[in-house]
Structures are given as structure tokens and as C-alpha cells.
Amino acid sequence: MANILSIKALLTTTFLIFSVFCTKTPAREHINIGYGVNNSPPYALIEQEQLTGGVIYDIAVQVAKELGLDINFVFLPRTRVEQYLLDGTLDVYFISNPKWITAPEIIWSEPMFDEQNVIVQLSGEQDYTKLSDLYEKRIGTVHGYIYPALTAAFERQDIYRSDVKSLQDNFQRLDKGWIDGFVGSDILIHHALQKSGEDERFQIASYLVSRHDIRTAISPKSKVSVAKLLSVINRLTSDGVIDKILAGYIEH
């Protein structure tokens, strides 16, 4: 009898040990977050198509931490953003605006911060003070971006639009005299000039192209609760967390 009990005890112990080792830890839910080469520093710090830091990265880490999610960063061209949000390939795209992604199904956060589109030109050139000063000029733009304040002038060819992949490309083309100026975000431009130390080579024109807010675009097919995403993103904004992230990349 004692031997039988010992065998039963051994079998029970073995079963318990086997169960412990065979039990898999449930995989955490992940969130798909988009970014691309069009997201210049400090919005995205990219090395070999991998996001290694920047505003998008830091906001993503905060959101994922709040919701207990793993992050999957998705590298994509600007022209695919709307499609990927609509079909659920992306759950969120952080740096955007309803004027740039117009599909009515897209869900939007509250404004996270403000941004201005300005014109950069070579220092010493005649200042652009109004829209008509840009007529018959070749103005650098980023492929896939919409510039509502300039759209009509581009379509009439009063201003010649010249697309490239990134802000850095436009700086290089302007420096070589291939374009007469370029349009871009004041946040990205100030950061680029601070890092390059070439602020004396370029100047920001007096003409303000547009002022707009930056929001997070959320997929209507998001795997993550839209209500939870909105709650966390809007709270990070109201608590000043996103402003603090942005300030960390901009020297004053």
C-alpha cells in the first residue's frame, strides 16, 4: 500500500511540474503604430528603417505603458497611411490632421499640439511676405503631403510644386539652388537648423503658410479599444506629458 501511495504521489508531483513548464504565458496584445521617412526629426529618429527614438516613439511608449500593450512600429510611405488606417493594418498614426487624412471613418483625438507651415529660403534673398511672392517659384514639398493653403496655387501652376521624400532633401536642394524655397513644419525646421548649426545659411520667410493642430488618427478597425486609446491620448495631452516630450527635442 505504501508503495502504491508513493507512486501516486510521484505521479502527481511529476504532473504538476510538467503542467508548470507546459503552461504558456499569454501573449500580450500589441498595437500597430505607423511612421515613415516623411516623419523628419524630431518626430521620428530612424536608423535603417527602424524607429529608434523621437516624439512618435516616446508617445507610443507612454500609450503602450498605460494600456499594457506591446508595440509594433510599421514603416510605410505617407501615401499608404489612410489606406492602412482604413483596413486596420495600422491602429494609430500619431502626427496628423483631418485635412491631410480626409476619410470620414477615421477617428481623431483632441489636438495634441500646434504646428505652423512656413517657407524656408536662403539667407539674403528677398523675403517672401505674401502668397503672390511665391508665384513662378519652384517650392519644395514632401511627397504625399497636402498643403491646403497652397493647393489652389499649385493646381493653377502659379507656384511650381517639387516633391521629395523628406525635409532633409529639401534643405539640400535649396542649398544647391535647385529650388527657390520649401514649405515645412516650423517644429521640424527649427530642430533641423539647431542640429545642423546652419541657421545663418537659411532664413524663415515672413509669409506664414498655415497654422494647424496635430492630432492622432485612429483606425475604425483598431484591435485596441478606441475608447481606451482616446482616453489615454487625450489625458496625456491635458496632463502636459506630450508637451514635455516635445520640449525635450526643442532647444529654447
Image (cartoon, helix red, strand yellow):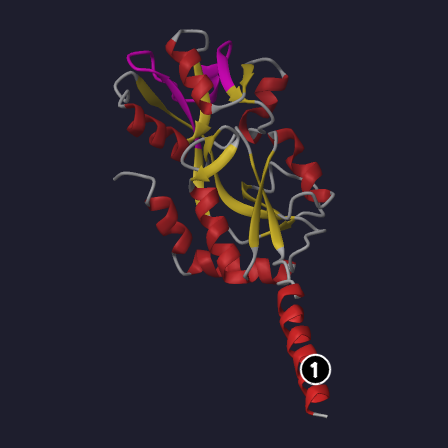
> Which portion, as a residue range, is magenta?
117-140
Residue 101 screen position, x and y as percent: 63, 38
Q: In this view, does 130 lie to the left or right of 222?
A: left
Numbered marks: total:
1
Does the stretch in magenta take in 211?
no
Q: How crowded is mark 1: few (under 14 residues within 10 Å), some or many (20 or more)?
A: few
Between residue 206 and residue 203, name the one nearer to us. 203
Residue 151 screen position, x and y as percent: 59, 25
Location of residue 126 by image quarter: top left
Residue 128 screen position, x and y as percent: 39, 18
Does the stretch in magenta take in 129?
yes
Residue at left offset 51%, top offset 9%: 136
Quadrant containing the C terminus is top left
Quadrant containing the N terminus is bottom right
User: Tag 1's secondary structure?
Assistant: helix
Residue at left offset 68%, top offset 91%: 2
Residue at left offset 44%, top offset 12%: 173
Residue 143 screen position, x and y as percent: 58, 23
Residue tagged 1: 7
Q: Is residue 199 left or right of residue 61?
A: left
Above or below, 154 against 96 in this view is above
